[in-house]
Image (spheres, grey):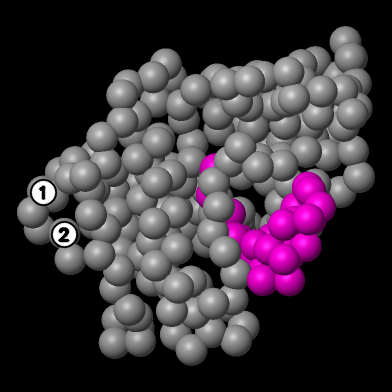
């Protein structure tokens, strides 16, 4: 598998982000209130600093305050690796939130990192929100696992060919394929080979997590 992979260099030293408060995802109790997409879009429009992040799944409002520094580094490094891959394999474009994605009516999600196919890239340049994904990825924080693993995961699994949960504590990726009932737990190399690509995307997870936590930066390849 290694000789088929194009290993991407992850440069960590130039990524300096201030510490922010830990990320928390809170769902408003459904028995108390069912939210609509129009109401949540108004909350988003009224939030000039784009924080907290508002999402809507099955009538539940999810609110995520600003993430901490390791979370931000994990997002940026994954985005960078995907962007480098897609420059050589132009199947789509990688993005990070805030960016509204509506996979089903009356839902709004904002994945930490995601890839849109090229036809969707062209469509959203004139009309939002995005409605089609190739990849969705969420980076866990201590209190976000329920939102990412329980609330949002079934939605992504119904519509996204690839859903990656990045567990910083365990240093693993949980990979959910379309309609899968169980994830693939990856500890070494994440390989994604989308249809039409000449080569797979490969991410060396030990090096990725070392870069996230600024460990042995000089040894990155």
Question: Where residue 152 appears, x then y in whole percent?
Answer: 70, 41
Left or right: where does residue 188 sit relative to residue 35?
left
**Camera-side residue: 56 or 129?**
129
* Residue drawn 30% across the image and 64% down it: 204
Give the quarter of the figure containing the C terminus: bottom left
Q: CA distance from mark 2 to mark 1?
A: 7 Å
Query: In the rendered image, is residue 71 in sight?
Result: yes
Left or right: where does residue 203 sit relative to residue 83?
left
**Camera-side residue: 2 or 43?**
43
- Residue 124 belongs to the span the image colors magenta: yes
Query: In the rendered image, is residue 200 in sight?
Result: no
Question: Where residue 9 appears, x then y in whole percent?
Answer: 25, 65
| In this view, 201 is above or below 19 | below
Which mark is on residue 220?
Answer: 2
- Residue 113 belongs to the span the image colors magenta: yes
Part of the protein shown in magenta: 112-135
Residue indicated by mark 1: 216
* Residue drawn 67% across the image and 19% down it: 47
Left or right: where does residue 5 sit relative to residue 47?
left
Residue 144: image quadrant is: top right
Residue 87: image quadrant is: bottom left
State the SS at label 1: loop
């Amino acid at each position: 598998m290694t000789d088929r992979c194009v290993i991407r260099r992850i440069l960590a030293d130039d990524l300096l982000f201030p510490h922010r408060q830990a990320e928390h995802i809170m769902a408003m109790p459904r028995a108390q209130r069912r939210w609509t997409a129009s109401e949540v879009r108004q909350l988003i429009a009224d939030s000039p600093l784009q924080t907290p992040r508002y999402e809507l799944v099955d009538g539940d409002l999810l609110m995520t305050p600003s993430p901490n520094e390791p979370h931000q580094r994990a997002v940026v490094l994954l985005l960078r690796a995907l962007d480098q891959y897609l420059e050589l394999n132009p199947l789509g474009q990688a993005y990070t939130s805030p960016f509204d994605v509506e996979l089903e009516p009356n839902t709004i999600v904002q994945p930490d990192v995601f890839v849109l196919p090229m036809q969707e890239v062209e469509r959203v340049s004139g009309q939002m929100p995005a409605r089609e994904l190739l990849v969705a990825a969420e980076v866990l924080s201590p209190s976000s696992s329920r939102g990412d693993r329980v609330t949002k995961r079934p939605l992504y699994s119904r519509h996204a060919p690839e859903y990656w949960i990045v567990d910083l504590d365990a240093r693993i990726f949980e990979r959910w394929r379309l309609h899968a009932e169980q994830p693939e737990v990856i500890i070494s190399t994440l390989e994604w080979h989308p249809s039409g690509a000449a080569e797979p995307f490969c991410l060396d997870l030990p090096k990725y997590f070392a870069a996230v936590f600024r460990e042995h930066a000089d040894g990155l390849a």
